[in-house]
């Protein structure tokens, strides 16, 4: 059925058709299933829209990819396969993947009103310790699920932590995420510069890294919530990448934070990955 529907379009390339046959992407045309309500984000590779699912009147988010080269498609398909393997209230979950009428990929996800980054910018001030504690708990629950599923997010930061209309905090943006090998190791350079763990930067020398990279990035995200920006943000990104492995672990600047909060952060940003807490132990 899927193959017949795909061939009926007459325009899919073989590698796109293979994704339909394999059940990764639906042959249904999303333009008749969803109605755009408003644009909520624009990027180099995709635009994101708030939309209405006409089948059940559910509000969803649709990520519409702009380009369709073979290399870019392979990356998109990797993200789709990753999303199909996860299901948690602490993650933005996949609702479907489609080829539009012009054969661009649309990924349909849970809709969330905004990100933690948006909240910080709207407030124009850092978050309170109690607010950071509540958000951190939910992010750690999401990381616990991913790590127990042998998956690494690799891009934890405020822009990738979303908040739903009813206040549920969810991890999002799994474009850089990876299914780890059975020993939990990865070796590719993935992540956002200011949040990236030292061992990712040094991966070409040391070989591999694992789940603790998410804990480091989570710790930098905690500082971001407490200070509005990650450490070294005043530097150019390439300079920050040089200094992260060289410097001592970052700490909070103000002396108003509790001793317990400082100790919690220190467990997240230990330079040696072995010394970091796990998502479970930090809960």
Image (cartoon, rainbow, N blue to C red):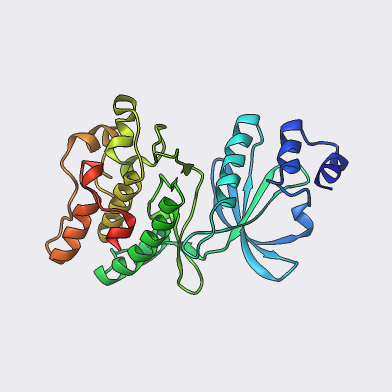
Which of 86 and 197 lies nearest the eye of the viewer? 86
- Relative to residue 30, is residue 167 depicted above or below? below
| x and y, in percent, of residue 117 in the image | 39, 58
Q: Is residue 47 visible?
A: yes
- Relative to residue 170, is residue 220 depicted above or below? above
What residue is rendered at 18% in x and 55% in y?
252
Q: Residue furthest bottom?
A: 166
| x and y, in percent, of residue 163 in the image | 46, 65
Quarter of the image for residue 237 reads top left
| x and y, in percent, of residue 281 in the image | 28, 59
Q: Residue furthest front?
A: 182
Which quadrant of the figure contains the C terminus?
A: bottom left
What residue is rendered at 52% in x and 64% in y?
112
**Is 45 placed left or right of 32 in the picture?**
left
Q: Is residue 257 visible?
A: no
- Relative to residue 268, is residue 11 depicted above or below? above
What residue is rendered at 17% in x and 38% in y?
247
**Is 234 placed left or right of 173 in the picture?**
left
The total of numbered circles placed on residues is 0
What residue is rendered at 25% in x and 57% in y?
227
Which of 90 and 65 lies nearest the eye of the viewer? 90
| x and y, in percent, of residue 106 in the image | 67, 49
**Is 196 placed left or right of 99 in the picture?**
left
Q: Residue furthest top?
A: 205
């Amino acid at each position: 059925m899927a193959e017949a529907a795909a061939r009926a379009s007459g325009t899919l390339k073989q590698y796109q058709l293979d994704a339909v046959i394999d059940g990764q992407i639906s042959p249904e045309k999303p333009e008749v299933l969803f109605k755009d309500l408003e644009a909520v984000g624009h990027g180099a590779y995709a635009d994101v829209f708030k939309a209405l699912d006409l089948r059940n009147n559910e509000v969803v988010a649709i990520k519409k990819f702009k380009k369709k080269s073979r290399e870019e498609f392979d990356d998109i398909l990797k993200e789709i396969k990753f999303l199909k393997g996860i299901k948690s209230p602490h993650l933005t979950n996949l609702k479907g993947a489609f080829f539009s009428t012009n054969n661009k990929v649309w990924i349909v996800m849970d809709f969330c009103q905004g990100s933690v980054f948006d909240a910080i910018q709207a407030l124009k001030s850092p978050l309170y310790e109690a607010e950071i504690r509540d958000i951190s708990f939910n992010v750690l629950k999401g990381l616990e699920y991913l790590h127990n599923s042998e998956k690494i997010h690799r891009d934890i930061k405020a822009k990738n932590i979303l908040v739903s209309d009813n206040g549920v905090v969810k991890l999002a943006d799994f474009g850089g995420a990876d299914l780890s090998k059975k020993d939990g190791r990865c070796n590719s350079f993935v992540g956002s510069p200011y949040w990236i763990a030292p061992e990712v930067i040094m991966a070409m020398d040391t070989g591999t890294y694992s789940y603790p990279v998410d804990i480091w990035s989570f710790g930098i995200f905690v500082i971001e919530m407490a200070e509005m920006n990650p450490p070294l943000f005043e530097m150019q990104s390439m300079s920050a990448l040089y200094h992260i492995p060289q410097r001592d672990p970052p700490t909070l600047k103000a002396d108003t934070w509790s001793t317990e909060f400082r100790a919690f952060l220190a467990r997240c940003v230990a330079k040696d990955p072995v010394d970091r807490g796990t998502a479970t132990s930090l809960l």
